[in-house]
Amino acid sequence: MAFQLPALMYPHNALEPHIDALTMEIHHGKHHQAYINNLNTAVAGTSMDSMFVEELISNIGSLPKEKQMAVRNNGGGHYNHSFFWKVLSPKGGGQPAGELSNAINSTYGSFDEFKSKFTTAGTGRFGSGWVWLVSSQGKLTICSTPNQDNPLMYGLVETNGIPLIGLDVWEHAYYLKYQNRRPDYINAFWNLVDWGMANDYFKKSN
């Protein structure tokens, strides 16, 4: 079972002006596809090629040692991007509601304070990586990971749990429009977050 590039749920230009169409076209069709191609090469002809990507990246330590780094980088890249496309929505923005809103306010004091801490984590990630809002047994945590690591990689990253939202802060995610202005890109991200989806993930994580 070869891993495949998931179709976007919206056209490449649907996220403008916050994320431009060319960035989406390259990011989805070339960068994400490259991770999938490399992952398929790494697992071809092994029992791993019948596993779900979440299963692979959650159990990297149990995989053959010669395959672990390829799965970590490329399986992580496939999972992270597949998740990221779902986080973004042309109808996103605003504020979370329901149980997630209550949890954010309880944990961070306010939605604005949560956004500030998330933004700080994203701007503070040196080099390439991701920033996440994670739920672990109903407890919220903001964390960042290097490269294509993510909170599902138990034993490899500091913070584990179920991702609720994630933001790609690799330069390829924003450089065409924002150049070196990562804070502007992060600020634009808040106009696109699908909080309904994040709330659904939060309810399932409890």
Image (spheres, rainbow, N blue to C red):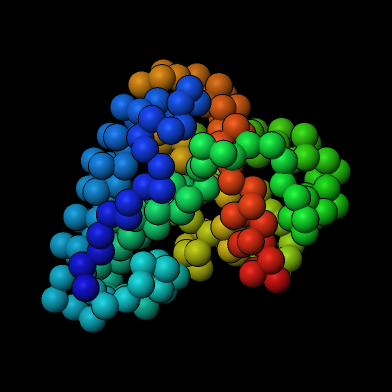
Q: Residue at x 55, y 22 (%)?
A: 184
Q: Residue at x 82, y 54 (%)?
A: 102
Residue 146 visible, this orientation: no
Q: Is residue 122 left or right of residue 57?
A: right
Percent from the top left, x then y, of residue 175?
38, 23
Q: Is residue 83 left or right of residue 91?
A: left
Q: Residue at x 50, y 64 (%)?
A: 152
Which of the two residues, 22 or 158, is positioned nearer the viewer here? 22
Q: Quadrant of the N terminus?
A: bottom left
Percent from the top left, x then y, of residue 147?
40, 46
Q: Residue 27, relative to residue 7: is it above or below?
A: above
Which of the two residues, 158 or 112, is positioned nearer the viewer here? 112
Q: Residue 68, relative to residue 14: is it above or below?
A: below
Q: Is residue 151 left or right of residue 49?
A: right
Which of the two residues, 78 or 159, is positioned nearer the viewer here? 78
Q: Residue 97, relative to residue 53: is it above or below?
A: above
Using the rendered view, name the quadrant where residue 110 is placed.
top right
Percent from the top left, x then y, of residue 182?
51, 25
